[in-house]
Structure formats: structure tokens, C-alpha cells
Amino acid sequence: MYVEFDRDTCVGMYQCVAEWDTFEKNLNDGKADLKGSEEEEDDLFVVEVPDSEEFDAKFAARSCPVDAIEVYDDDGEQVV
Ligand code: SF4
């Protein structure tokens, strides 16, 4: 499972930070940061999700009010 984070869309509400600690606040930018991720395209960050954190990652995605977080299974099928 992996997460795609559209940082350009993020408006810094930080619900995701409360759900999954791989997201952290970046108060300077007014955005979240996705720890350990790689920037795949401009402002699109991707990170693998450890099995033990899948539940939290999905919750973080559901909590985002602007749908900046998407979750995909290993086949590339979007699950959230
Ligand atoms: S919940 Fe969404 S808008 Fe808020 S900080 Fe996280 S990614 Fe950004």
C-alpha cells in the first residue's frame, strides 16, 4: 500500500497529522509534510505504508477536507 499526497492542494488543516504520524505540521508553509516520501511530480509526494500503519493512513486520507491524500493498494488500485 502507498499514499499519494498532493501538497499543492493541502490547506494545512492538519486533521491528517492527528490520524497518522507520518504526516507532520509545517507551520512555515501552512502545509503538511509527508515524512520519508519522494516527490514524484511537482508537489506530489509518495510514500510506502508499513502494514501496521495501513489503518492510520486510510483514516488520514478520509480526514482530509480537500482530498489531498489518496491511498492505493499494491496493484495501484485506489482504496481511499
Ligand atoms: S488534512 Fe489535508 S489539508 Fe489538512 S494538512 Fe492534511 S493534507 Fe493538508
Image (cartoon, helix red, strand yellow):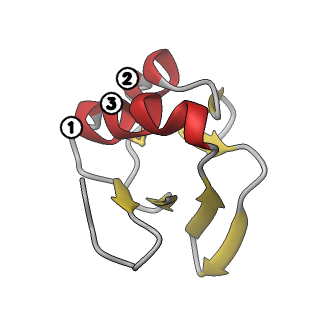
**Residue 30 can be seen in this image:** no
Mark whose residue sits in front, 3 or 1: 3
- Disc 1 target residue: 65
Q: Residue furthest bottom?
A: 41
Q: Are marks 2 and 1 in contact (CB under 8 Å)?
A: yes
Residue 59 numbered tag: 3
- Residue type at numbered disc 3: Phe
Q: At numbered mark 3, what does the secondary structure look like: helix, strand or loop?
A: helix
The image quadrant of residue 78 is bottom left
**In this picture, is 46 found above or below 68?**
below
Q: CA distance from mark 3 to mark 1?
A: 12 Å
Percent coordinates x, y for residue 23 in the rendering: 59, 34
Q: At numbered mark 2, what does the secondary structure look like: helix, strand or loop?
A: helix
Say which label, 2 or 1, has the lower sequence index: 2
Q: Is mark 1 within 8 Å of ligand 1?
A: yes
Residue at left offset 38%, top offset 42%: 11
Residue at left offset 44%, top offset 25%: 14
Side (left or right) of 24 relative to 13:
right
Q: Are marks 3 and 2 in contact (CB under 8 Å)?
A: no
Residue at left offset 35%, top offset 39%: 58
- Disc 2 target residue: 15
Say which label, 3 or 1, has the lower sequence index: 3
**Residue 22 can be seen in this image:** yes
Q: Residue furthest right?
A: 36
- Residue type at numbered disc 1: Pro
Percent coordinates x, y for residue 36 in the rendering: 78, 51
Residue 28 numbered tag: none
**In this picture, is 17 found above or below 8?**
above
- Residue type at numbered disc 2: Gln
Mark whose residue sits in front, 3 or 2: 3
Q: Is mark 3 within 8 Å of ligand 1?
A: no
